[in-house]
Amino acid sequence: MAIGRRASESQSSLFVAAQDLPRSPGHPFYERLNQLLRSAGFDRFVEGKCQEFYAPKMGRPGTPPGVYFRAMLVGYFEGIDSERGIAWRCSDSLALRAFLGVSLEESVPDHSTLSRTRRLIDVETHREVFSFVLKILAEHGLLQGKTVGIDATTLEANAALRSIVRRDDGSGYRDFLIGLAKSSGVETPSRADLAKLDRKRSKKGSNDDWENPHDPDARITKMKDGRTHLAHKAEHAVDLDSGAVLAVTVQPADRGDTRSVYATLSEASDQLAKVSGDERQSAKACESPVEAVLDKGYHSNEVLVALDELGIKSYVSEPDRGRRRWRGKADEQRATYGNRRRLRGRRGKRLLRKRGELIERSFAHVLETGGMRRVHLRGHENIEKRYLVHTAAFNLGLVMRALVGRGTPRGLQGLAGMLRATMAAFMRVAALLESAFAAIGRSERDLSANRPSPGPRHLSATFATGR
């Protein structure tokens, strides 16, 4: 057979028959996910919710809502952090084209179309899509809502610290340092002088004094790796019975945990009320959380009293504050002692272990492998839209894990490799056992051939001894 050569230049065909178009066998994960969404009526649901954002019958048809939300789901399953990357990946893959429902004669929506569609659809509709996915989890028995764990993390903002300006006069950070240098007697400060002056300042950047003009919602904060950056705060409420994320909120990064927990807990209660109030649910979930498991960053008298008034049992890790005085604080004392008693029990210790496992797992999947640790959008509204769909994809991954054994396409590919390796190892073990049995059979035949045949004297001795 002669070697084939790649043409250096090729002219595209003017017409291509439909039967000559390339076809893909499809990806089994995305095919099964499409079946799941189709059986739940996903496209009909989102088209009904997004009808008000489109003109009645004017202009060219826009991007279908089902295509937009599926493209956002691809961002999680493929670990792509930007809408530009999502559009490129969907356009390049035949399997993802089939998942979106876009034929080869059509163009996949580009990043500008996805961005415009995201700005067109409001946050509440994205939250309705998140609730729709929670109902799918409840139908498959993966949602209880009785015990909720809450924790928060930081998202790196799409803004630079060098761009911050003063809130009072709008001057930049370099101009501010030059003014400080001149006031201290240095008329023409150099870059080294400004750096030295900046190191000597006790209080560097305060969110009360500084803001970023391009993303006013970003706040100066310390990231998980110790760096100081402009960031946002994302808080998860996770069902500790199944690992599903019940609610997410995006809040200012400088807001303390004892203040942000109320919004997240309220959102979790609203989501559970929507799921439990749905008539199609066969297995009812709890209408509101019964137990709340938190880390020591949430421990305060106000939080414990508020949970106690709501009828929620608290399991909040208590920091070592030494001996405390409770004069005039009977409610705070009762709530704190009740929380301490529950923590020391067997169930409290088990719930704290589950909190560390399941909540950190949701952060790892959504932020690290899912690509949302650094956001490419600005403003809490835009970030929350993308984050809600991203977390809904994580919940869909839980359903897919129950159906096909893996929650991501990459995990399903790894499962096939693991099965092949297991079968190869099984064949090797079977071959070793077969050779071992053959060797044992040969040794037994050799022993029987070399053993002398018993005569009359041997037989009488054998019967006498019983051997």
Image (spheres, helix red, strand yellow):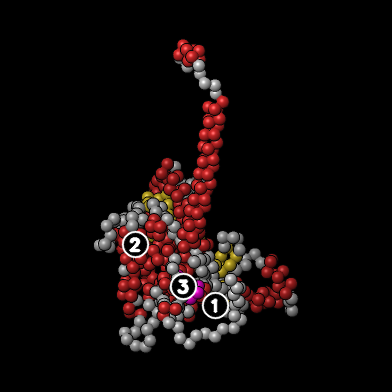
Counting residues from the N terminus, which is met first, the one under dot 1 or under dot 3? 3
Identify the residue at horizontal 32%, vertical 86% (top origin): 57
- The relative height of residue 149 versus residue 210 in the rendered view (above or below) is above
- The relative height of residue 158 versus residue 292 in the rendered view (above or below) is below
* Spatial separation of the CA atoms under disc 2 and disc 1: 41 Å
Identify the residue at horizontal 38%, vertical 75% (top origin): 65
Identify the residue at horizontal 60%, vertical 73% (top origin): 2
Of badges 3 and 2, nearer the viewer stands 3
- The relative height of residue 26 versus residue 213 in the rendered view (above or below) is above
Q: Which mark is residue 136?
A: 2
Closer-to-camera residue (13/422) = 13
Of badges 1 and 3, nearer the viewer stands 3
Q: Would you say 456 lies left or right of 66 here?
A: right
Classed neighbour count for the residue bearing mark 2: other residues with Cα under 10 Å, few (<14), some (14–19), many (≥20): many
Q: Amino acid at mark 1?
A: Pro
Counting residues from the N terminus, which is met first, the one under dot 3 or under dot 2? 3
Q: Amino acid at mark 3?
A: Leu
On the image, the x and y values in percent for residue 241 come to 39, 52
On the image, the x and y values in percent for residue 285 come to 31, 56
Q: Which mark is residue 213?
A: 1
Query: In the image, which residues are magenta?
Result: 89-95
Of badges 2 and 1, nearer the viewer stands 2
Q: Under tag 1, what secondary structure? A: loop
The quadrant in which residue 230 appears is bottom right
On the image, the x and y values in percent for residue 417 come to 51, 56
Residue that mark 3 sits on:
94
Check if mark 1's residue and mark 3's residue have beta carbons within 8 Å. Answer: no
* Spatial separation of the CA atoms under disc 1 and disc 3: 41 Å
On the image, the x and y values in percent for residue 191 come to 72, 74
